[in-house]
Amino acid sequence: MHILITGAAGFLGQRLIQTLVARGELAGKALSRLTLVDQVVASVPHISELEPNVPEVQTQAVDISAPGSLDALLDDRPDVIFHLAAVVSSAAEEDLDLGWSVNFGATHALLEGCRSRNLSTTRLIMASSVAVYGGALPPILDDMTALTPQSSYGTQKAMCELMINDYSRRGLVDGRVLRLPTIVIRPGRPNAAASSFASSILREPFNGQQAICPVPTDLKLFVMSPGRVIEALIHGAEVSGTAFGPSRSVMLPGITISVAEMLDNLRERGGEQALALVRHEPDPRITAIVSSWPVAFDTYRARELGFSGDSGFSDIVDAFLNERST
């Protein structure tokens, strides 16, 4: 099986690569090749040649928004495409042209490339976002709630979702869209995502560093751990298109939690000294974006399809602390 991953240098891409290599298969088929694409050359995990089902790994630095940049990649006819490349929320809000060219334009080019090559059985898994919702919403949402994004990023993702549904309906590709909750706790350093603070206010204090909380502590988020997201991406590639049905978009099961409750978890695990490292500096721009996202979902459809979420926020924190200690 040949797998193409866009956004392979990002933290989700890197975790996905490591998991796939460790598994050695997807949907019951041995991995023969991994093609890793990002703006920079993605890191490749060490692969022992003594392990069974060792795939060939190719990594390329490609601007997927450039005309024709996907041609050679699709000429190799990948069986599965994990489309993770994106300009994240705050960056897409600040640079409209960049957001449209990467988030929307590259996705359209990817779909058209599959169409022109008759890649109708290729499974395309795109990472979407809770940001496709916004504005005046019901107390609890489900997958059929109308998409009313309140940001350019959410709008771009929503339009991509509709395209993937239509191309799949027409039998041009076998698409599936996973709407990701806010991912907590991300490794590394804060990035341009509006939700970056949600990881930073835990990650940095646990590492003895200061963090900034730019939102009110009563603000709530819908969150999911990195480990569960990777499981969902793989499961999304293995579920049949028939099971998804006419709507190829599904909201993954997350946890609703307030910033105050997140900080309570920080105090319980790290003590008052860790909590004291969080500085509260309101940022109206960040608050406006994040507070437009819904926080309560009925994710019955995801669970019917076999997706699973975290059992509680304490498990998310424990998973981070366990990884950090290894």
Image (spheres, grey):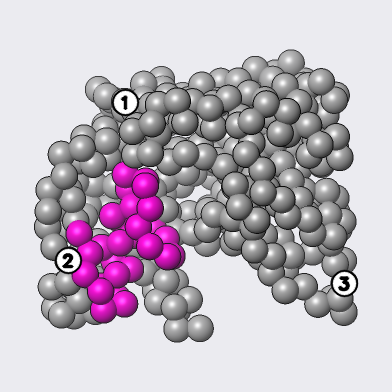
Q: Is residue 287 left or right of residue 193?
A: left
Q: Residues within 10 Å of mark 2 (few under 14, many from 20)?
A: many
Cα distance in 3D space between marks 3 and 1: 48 Å
Cα distance in 3D space between marks 2 and 1: 28 Å
Q: Residue at x 42, y 45 (%)?
A: 181
- Secondary structure of the residue carrying numbered label 2: strand
Residue receiving disc 1: 150
Q: Residue at x 33, y 52 (%)?
A: 196
Q: Earlier in the sequence, mark 3 or mark 1?
A: 3
Q: Is residue 314 left or right of residue 167?
A: left
Residue receiving disc 2: 278
Q: What residue range appears in magenta?
A: 184-212
Cα distance in 3D space between marks 3 and 2: 47 Å
Residue receiving disc 3: 52
- Secondary structure of the residue carrying numbered label 1: loop
Is 304 one of the magenta-colored residues? Answer: no
Which of the numbered marks, if any, corresponds to residue 325? none
